[in-house]
Amino acid sequence: MATAVKGADRTAVRKKVGPKASVFQWQARPAGDAKAPLQKGELEAASAAVVRVILRKRGLQVVSVKKKPKPLFAGTGGIKEAGIVVMIRQLSTMINAGVPMVQAFELLAAASEGRGMKAMLEGILGPIKEGERVADAFARYPKYFDRLFVSLLAAGDQGGILDTILLRLADYREKSLALQKKIRSAMIYPASIITVMLLVTAILMIFVIPVFSQLFSSFGATLPALTQAVIAISNWMRGHWYLVVFIPIAVVWAFIVAYRKSFGFRTQVDRISLKLPIMGDVILKGSVARFMRTLATMQAAGVPINEALETLSRISNNVIIERAVNAARERVLEGGFITDSLKETGVFPAMAVHMLAIGEQTGAIEVMAEKVADFYEGEVTETVARMSTLMEPIIMVVLGIIVGTLVVAMYMPIFELGAVVTHGG
C-alpha cells in the first residue's frame, strides 16, 4: 500500500516499477499424458520463464511459449472495453441464476467470437479450476482489469454478493467508457478540424500559389504587396517543406515524451489544462464525475473510505486532482472529513463538495456521490454538445478568412491587369 505523504505539495510518491509485462501465447498438455490434446492460451507476464513456472504449477507440461506479436494496426486483435462490459454483465446474470463459476466461464468462452476475448476467458478459467480466487484470476490481466476492479471483486466474493458487485462494475465501466468518449471527442474534434485547416492551407501554399507565381512572372509588372507576401511565404514553404512537415511532428512527440517522463512538466500541463477556456471545464467536470462514480461504487462494495481514496488518487489521471485526493485521505486518517480538505484545495467545484459533505454527515456517501456523478456527466454531455455547435461557425469563419485572403492575393494582379488593358483600349 502506498504511503501517505504529509503536505499537499509532497503527494507524489515514486514507486518502483518492475519489468514490463508482455502477453505470451502458450501450448501445453497435462503432465504425464503425451496423448492428451494440446491446450492453448495466453498469459501476461514479465518473461517466458515466468509463464513456464505458472503452467507447471497448473500441472501442465509446456510445449511452447512465445511472445504474442503486436498487431500491425492499432486495435487489431485487441479486446474492446464494450466487449468486457458485456462479458461482466453476462457473468453477473449467470452467477445470479446459480450457474457454477467454472461452468459460467466455459459458457462465456464458448460463446465468445473474438479470439482475444476467448483466450483471456480461458486464461481466467484455468486458475479458477485449480481453486484460485476469482479476483486473483482476473488480476492476471491488469491491462483490462485494474486494481480497483480486482479489489471490488475480492470484496464481493468475500461478502457473498459477487453477482451484485459484477453488475455494479459493469454499470461503472459502461458509464466511465461513455464519459471517456465524450471527453475524447471534445478534444479530438477541434484538433482534427484545425489539422485539416492547416493541411488545406499548406496544400494551397505549396502547390496552387506557385502556379499563379509563374503566371505573374510573365507579366513583368510590379505585384501588389499582399501578393508579394503570399508568394514569398509560398516560396519559403516549398524550399523548407521538411520543416513544415517534421517540426509539428517533433513538437508533438517531444510534448508526449516530456509529459510521460517529467513529473514537473506533467504537473504544469495538468494545472494549465484545468484553466483552459471551455476545455478546462470539460476536463474538470469529467474528473469530478469519474471520482464520484468510483467513490460510490467502492462504498457500495464496503471498501473503507481511506482505501477508496488511495485508489481514487491513482486513477485521477491529473496530478492536481491527485494531490487534492491525497490531501483528503490524510485528513480522513487524522479523523477529519473528506470534504473539509477538498474545500481547502479549491480544485473541486463548490456544489460537488457541498453535496458530498451532506452525504458524509448523513452516512449516505454512496447515494450523494452517485447523484453528483450523474449531474456532472450530464454537464459534460451538454458542454461538449454546446462546444461543437459553437466551434463549427468559428472554424468556418477562420478557414474562410485564410482561403479568402489567398484568393484575393492571387486575383489582385489579374484585376489590375484587366484594368490596364481596359484603360489602354
Image (spheres, grey):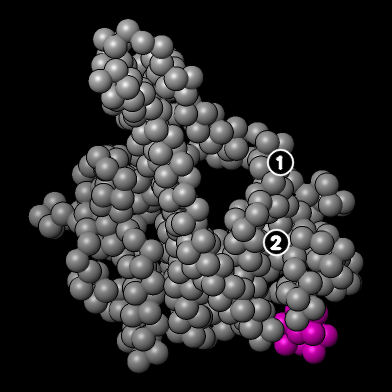
In this view, the residue farthest toward the left is: 35
Decide whether residue 360 is among the magenta residues.
yes
> Residue drawn 10% across and 55% down?
35
Query: In 3D space, how far apart are the residues under numbered discs 2 and 1 (Cα atoms)?
Result: 23 Å
- Residue 268 is labelled as 1
- Residue 310 is labelled as 2
Q: What type is the residue that disc 1 sits on?
A: Gln
Chief SS of the magenta region: helix
Q: Relative to 217, does residue 349 appear above or below in the rendering?
A: below
Which sits in the foreground, 235 or 182? 235
Q: Quadrant of the C terminus?
A: top left
Residue 324: tell me if it is visible.
yes
Q: Secondary structure at mark 2?
A: helix
In this view, the residue farthest toward the bottom is: 97
In the image: residue 298, left or right of residue 409: right
Q: Quadrant of the N terminus?
A: bottom right
Q: What type is the residue that disc 2 sits on?
A: Glu
* Image location of residue 421, percent across then percent down: 28, 20
Q: Which residues are the magenta region?
A: 356-365
In the image: residue 341, left or right of residue 116: right
> Residue drawn 39% across and 72% down?
85
In this view, the residue farthest toward the top is: 220
